[in-house]
Image (spheres, helix red, strand yellow):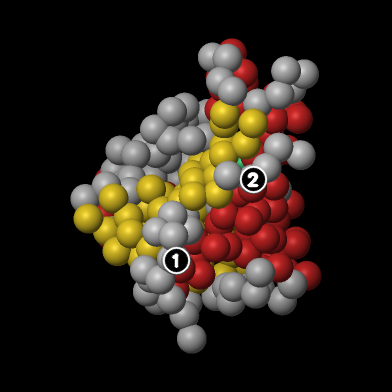
């Protein structure tokens, strides 16, 4: 059976979507003991751990402690699902090719934080989310899948975030399943999905509701 470790920092709704989709999780690890997602995981019978970043003097020692906890589970895949700490180069390289992130924008637009506000300010008509493999440059790794949503005239940050989040909850479980099934191939920044009838199975463009 595949081993998946999920890293969270807060609410944990993407992690919950993985559990709901039947993805077997070896452990959920949070850098914040108060993360609401930890309780959700526990209730679902998933082992939880905390590596509190505030207890470490610097990024390197936190990353090393986190890696020790992760390696204990010998995961095939590590998923950053709302994990809000930047990870150092050594950490990222240690999990090269098996570290996945969900980001709430259509990368490479809007890397970093406040993506929904920035998409609204920029006047985007389309926004969305991206699942990608993590490389040392923040939010720049090979794109596995994207889902697009419309930006409506009366949207505010909250309504747009909710529309994107609904797609995140579809996209992340799909990407994890493809990964675990060995269907993904990576050529530099381009990711192929084997067995996709239209060769575009990793693009989701839901209809306007
Ligand atoms: C999601 O929008 C994710 O894309 C971003 O942070 C949010 C986390 O939400 N990185 P949740 O903790 O999964 O509910």
Extreme-bottom residue of the structure: 1
Asked if residue 97 shows in the view, the reply is no
Please tell me how crowded label 1 is: few (under 14), some (14-19), or many (20+) other residues with Cα within 10 Å: few
Residue at (57%, 31%) from the top-left corner? 127
Decide if residue 28 is on the left or right side of residue 3.
right
Please tell me how crowded label 2 is: few (under 14), some (14-19), or many (20+) other residues with Cα within 10 Å: few
Residue 128 picture location, percent across and down: 57, 37
Residue at (61%, 49%) from the top-left corner? 168
Can you tell which mark lies on residue 206? Answer: 2
Q: Quadrant of the C terminus?
A: top right
Extreme-front residue of the structure: 198
Residue at (78%, 70%) from the top-left corner? 43
Asked if residue 111 shows in the view, the reply is yes
Disc on the earlier residue, 2 or 1? 1
Residue 22 picture location, percent across and down: 65, 74
Label pair 2/1, CB-CB below 8 angstroms = no
Q: Is residue 58 above or below residue 185?
A: above
Q: Is residue 98 above or below residue 85?
A: below
Q: Quadrant of ligand 1?
A: top right
Q: Secondary structure at mark 1?
A: loop
The residue under label 1 is 197
């Amino acid at each position: 059976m595949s081993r998946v470790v999920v890293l969270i920092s807060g609410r944990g709704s993407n992690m919950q979507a993985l559990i709901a989709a039947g993805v077997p999780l070896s452990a959920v690890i949070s850098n914040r003991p108060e993360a609401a997602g930890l309780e959700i995981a526990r209730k679902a019978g998933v082992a939880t751990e905390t590596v509190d970043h505030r207890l470490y003097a610097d990024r390197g020692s936190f990353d090393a402690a986190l890696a020790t906890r992760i390696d204990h589970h010998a995961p095939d895949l590590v998923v950053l699902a709302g994990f809000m700490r930047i990870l150092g180069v050594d950490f990222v390289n240690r999990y090269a090719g098996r570290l996945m992130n969900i980001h709430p924008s259509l990368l490479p637009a809007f890397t970093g934080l406040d993506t929904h506000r920035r998409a609204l300010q920029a006047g985007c008509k389309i926004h969305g989310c991206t699942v990608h493999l993590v490389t040392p440059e923040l939010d720049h790794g090979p794109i596995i899948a994207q889902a697009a949503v419309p930006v409506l005239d009366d949207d505010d940050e909250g309504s747009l975030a909710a529309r994107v989040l609904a797609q995140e909850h579809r996209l992340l479980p799909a990407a994890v399943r493809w990964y675990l099934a060995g269907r993904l191939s990576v050529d530099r920044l381009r990711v192929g999905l084997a067995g996709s009838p239209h060769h575009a199975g990793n693009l989701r463009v839901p209809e306007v509701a």
